[in-house]
Amino acid sequence: MSRWTERYYADKAAGTCVRCHHQDAVPGQVECGYCAEANSDRVQALETDRRKKGLCPHCGKLPTPGYKTCAVARQQDRDYHAAKKAQVIHQVAA
């Protein structure tokens, strides 16, 4: 395991932000509020730039003709939503 991976898991176990290594992570998360917001802004800007260029906003590859995303991104989205739906159904049934 690399030293960066070891540090990530050590920070995660200690409840410290895995990006800045100084602040406490938000409960249930691995980053502090500041780093999480900065990362969110960075990802949003990257996706916006990719959309303007006509690329898949998730990976930057060329999208499937007739779609805004590539086939891999659409499949990942389908899998994610199917898992979330199954989780909700399981919670309601319990």
Image (cartoon, rainbow, N blue to C red):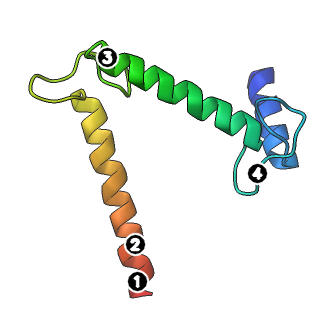
Please give the residue where the numbered disc 2 appears in the rendered image.
Answer: 88
Using the rendered view, name the quadrant where residue 89 is placed: bottom left
Query: Which of the two marks, 3 or 4, is nearer to us in this view?
Result: 3
* Camera-side residue of 37 and 23: 37
Query: Which of the two marks, 4 or 1, is nearer to us in this view?
Result: 4
Labels 3 and 2: the sequence-earlier one: 3
Query: Which of the two marks, 3 or 2, is nearer to us in this view?
Result: 3
Secondary element under disc 4, as helix, strand or loop, is: loop
Residue lying at the far bottom in this picture: please name it.
Answer: 94
How far apart are the two marked residues, 3 and 4, measured between alpha carbons?
33 Å
Please give the residue where the numbered disc 4 appears in the rendered image.
Answer: 26
Amino acid type at circle 2 is Val
The percent coordinates of residue 39 (x first, y second) are 62, 30
Left or right position of 21 against 45: right
Quadrant the C terminus occupies:
bottom left
Secondary element under disc 3, as helix, strand or loop, is: helix
Please give the residue where the numbered disc 1 appears in the rendered image.
Answer: 92
Query: Which of the two marks, 1 or 3, is nearer to us in this view?
Result: 3
Labels 3 and 4: the sequence-earlier one: 4
How far apart are the two marked residues, 4 and 2, measured between alpha carbons?
24 Å
How far apart are the two marked residues, 2 and 1, measured between alpha carbons?
6 Å
Using the rendered view, name the quadrant where residue 72 is placed: top left
Labels 1 and 3: the sequence-earlier one: 3
Is the Cβ of the residue at disc 3 closer than 8 Å to that at disc 4? no
Residue 59 visible at all: yes
Amino acid type at circle 3 is Lys
- Is 24 rendered above or below residue 62? below
Residue 31 visible at all: no
The circle drawn on residue 52 is: 3
Is the Cβ of the residue at disc 2 closer than 8 Å to that at disc 1? yes
